[in-house]
């Protein structure tokens, strides 16, 4: 396994972003709450805060706000809808000038989905992604087969969101969106989406 300096730098940038969020003003906190309440256009059971794509909200002067938003992957078509919905919500709450800025570093990861978001996915019938790393650790990059190889034996088993069985099979690497796979439970025989780990 190789740990890259770039991955370590991205981790440090994420820590800096988290520190900035801790220093937000009460107005920024309220605007973040409003922006974070916007439903994800592809998974409306989750809001943007639960999905983990809302990075920060900054006031830039009277009536001017900048929102930092990470796409779930580069080129994600939902980013435009998310941005428009954030602008609409903040305009409705008296902010005339809203800029939504895409933030690519640190890259969004399924580890950014909140525990509440994971609970909602499960209740909605989508198996939430497994946690892939400890947030405080640098990102390791394995050399070898593609990332579509079977999950390592150390990975937590993937449970059916309907019956809880871990006896499941992959039907298709892609489902209703590129970020989900289609699986079937071999116990209850129900198909279900699995939000893939990134």
Image (spheres, rainbow, N blue to C red):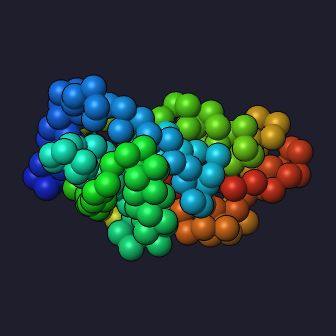
Q: Residue at x 44, y 63 (%)?
A: 84
Q: Residue at x 81, y 40 (%)?
A: 162
52 relative to 156 in the view: left or right: left
Residue 125 image point, x, y percent: 74, 46
Q: Residue at x 28, y 31 (%)?
A: 27
Q: Is residue 143 visible?
A: yes
Residue 124 image point, x, y percent: 72, 44
Q: For residue 112, which quarter of the picture? A: top left
Residue 36 image point, x, y percent: 44, 42
Residue 72 image point, x, y percent: 42, 59
Q: Residue furthest right?
A: 188
Q: Nearer the viewer, residue 156 or 21?
A: 21
6 relative to 186 in the view: left or right: left
Q: Is residue 132 visible?
A: no
Would you place residue 117 above or below residue 9 in this image?
A: above
180 relative to 132 in the view: left or right: right
| Count of numbered circles in the view | 0
Q: Nearer the viewer, residue 107 or 132?
A: 107
Q: Nearer the viewer, residue 86 or 153?
A: 86
Q: Residue at x 33, y 48 (%)?
A: 95
């Amino acid at each position: 396994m190789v740990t890259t300096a770039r991955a370590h730098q991205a981790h440090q940038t994420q820590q800096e972003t988290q520190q900035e969020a801790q220093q937000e003003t009460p107005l920024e906190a309220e605007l973040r709450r409003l922006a974070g309440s916007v439903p994800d256009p592809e998974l409306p059971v989750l809001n943007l805060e639960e999905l983990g794509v809302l990075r920060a909200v900054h006031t830039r002067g009277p009536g001017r706000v900048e929102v930092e938003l990470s796409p779930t992957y580069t080129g994600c078509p939902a980013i435009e809808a998310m941005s428009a919905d954030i602008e609409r919500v903040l305009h409705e709450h008296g902010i005339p000038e809203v800029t939504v800025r895409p933030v690519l570093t640190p890259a969004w990861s399924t580890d950014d989905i909140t525990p509440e978001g994971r609970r909602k996915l499960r209740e909605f019938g989508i198996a939430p992604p497994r946690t892939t790393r400890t947030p405080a650790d640098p990102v390791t990059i394995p050399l070898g087969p593609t990332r579509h190889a079977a999950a390592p034996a150390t990975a937590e088993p993937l449970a059916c969101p309907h019956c809880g069985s871990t006896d499941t099979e992959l039907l298709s690497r892609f489902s209703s969106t590129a970020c989900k796979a289609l699986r079937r439970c071999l116990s209850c025989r129900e198909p279900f989406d699995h939000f893939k780990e990134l």
